[in-house]
Amino acid sequence: MTADSTSDTAAVVAASGNAGAAASAAVSASASASAADGTTRGLPGAFMLGSHRVTTPVMLSPMAGVTNWPFRVLCESYGPDGLYVAEMITARALTAHNPKALRLCRFAPSETFRSLQLYGVDPHILEQAAGIVVDNHMADHVDLNFGCPVPKVTRRGGGSALPWKTDLFREIIRKVVHVCAPAGIPVTAKIRVGIDDTHTTFLDAGRIAQDEGCAMVTLHARTTAEYYGGHSDWDRIAQLTQALDIPVFGNGDIWTAEDAIAMAQQTGCAGVAIGRGCQGRPWLFADIRNAFAGSPQRVNPTLGQVGAIIERHAALLVEFYDGDERMAVHDLRKHCAWYLKGFPVGGDVRRQFMECESLDDVHRVVDSLDPDVPFPMQIADKPRGRVRYAKKVRLPYDWLESRTLSDEQRRDLFESDPLDDVY
């Protein structure tokens, strides 16, 4: 963070309560002019996603197990004019009306523009899932996942492995756009650079997505083989931006507002997508909103203020789990580890959070914290969440032999969804 950054205490306190609008107003009076100010400084401004205007070009990337509506509401309270996408839903689970999948499709009343991400490998199943979304008015925007690098996904040809098969990639996008477009629902795609440095796919995938009617493409500037390790290659974002006419959002290694500005200036991208950088830091969206507005103001909460956010997050999760406090606080555990990153609280406090079983337990641990401990600025620009390095990519047999599916691969691929077991 910059040396002249200042803590916006009012925003932190407001966001830990119920008033998201109050939080956004307190962040920065100048931020409402972010689109115009950003454009004059060579930064991206507002853009249209279908009929929806996104004033600050920042997006919360969908993250499995993280971006359910409680976390989205917290993030949106700091940057209400961005784009916030729900975590990945498998198309097969949605068509089966799986209860867990349907829970993940829920949105808070405050989410007036609803963004949902679908994942799958079978074009017909994805077409059916998109039809369910449209027929039941479940979302206003559908994102397609072609960026997941997890081995159990790629070994079945899904996620970031799928764009290698250009015929399958094109068929999926064409079918989903065909279903969504008449309803006025924009379709976007999340992709990676490719499988590895020898087998890149991002330029072909971007052009196909554009040709088949996608409204936007988000590029995570790593290959599947790189997973979440090393440094993302922002030059790839610049290449894709120059190659396409539709907006390109950049993703990868945005830990601070200054990183967001740097990516936008270096690549010319239309906006930035935030993933691991906001884990335990929903206020990062306020920082980025301010930065795009030309304001140096930053949110650097004290430990007490972070504790208030933890309690607010816990309460929202109880709502998400229909009053089940135990499930809510179990879900909260991973977030507590992220919230406390860098704070000198010791292993005992961290263990106590991991042992919480109720809201009262969470309150007792939060109440034991020293509220005046300042935010640990020394870790502000450090990686968060998973930092896993290069690994062997698991792919279907002979996957790289051709850019099109063989009949045998098509039969094998569509037998079952590789993520069925998570539901």
Image: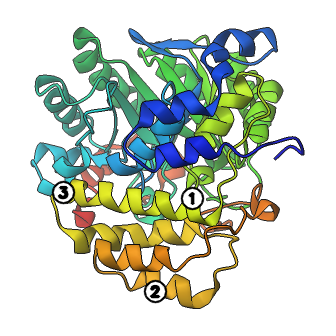
188 vs 400: above or below: above
Specify whether 347 is left or right of 63.
right
Q: Earlier in the sequence, mark 2 or mark 3?
A: 3
Please, what secondary structure does the residue beneath circle 3 have?
A: helix
Mark 3 lies on residue: 100
Mark 2 near mark 3, Cβ–Cβ under 8 Å?
A: no
Disc number lying in front (2 or 1): 1
Specify whether 240 is left or right of 47.
right
Residue at the extreme bottom of the image, as rendered: 348
Q: Earlier in the sequence, mark 2 or mark 1?
A: 1
Nearer to me, 275 or 353: 353
294 vs 300: above or below: above
Nearer to me, 127 or 360: 360
Q: Tell me which amino acid carries mark 1.
A: Gln
386 vs 21: above or below: below
Q: Quadrant of the C terminus?
A: bottom left
x and y percentages locating residue 52 in the rendered image: 41, 13
Please, what secondary structure does the residue beneath circle 1 have?
A: helix
Bin the neighbour count of mark 1 within 10 Å (Cα to Cα): few under 14, some 14-19, many 20 and up.
many
Disc number lying in front (1 or 3): 1
Q: What is the spatial separation of the Cα atoms under label 1 and label 3, in whole angstroms?
A: 32 Å
Q: How is the image coloured?
A: rainbow
Q: Which mark is residue 305?
A: 1
Q: Tell me which amino acid carries mark 2.
A: Gln
Q: Tell me which amino acid carries mark 3.
A: Lys
Res 70 seen here = yes
Nearer to me, 189 or 253: 253
Mark 2 lies on residue: 352
Disc number lying in front (2 or 3): 2
Please, what secondary structure does the residue beneath circle 2 have?
A: helix
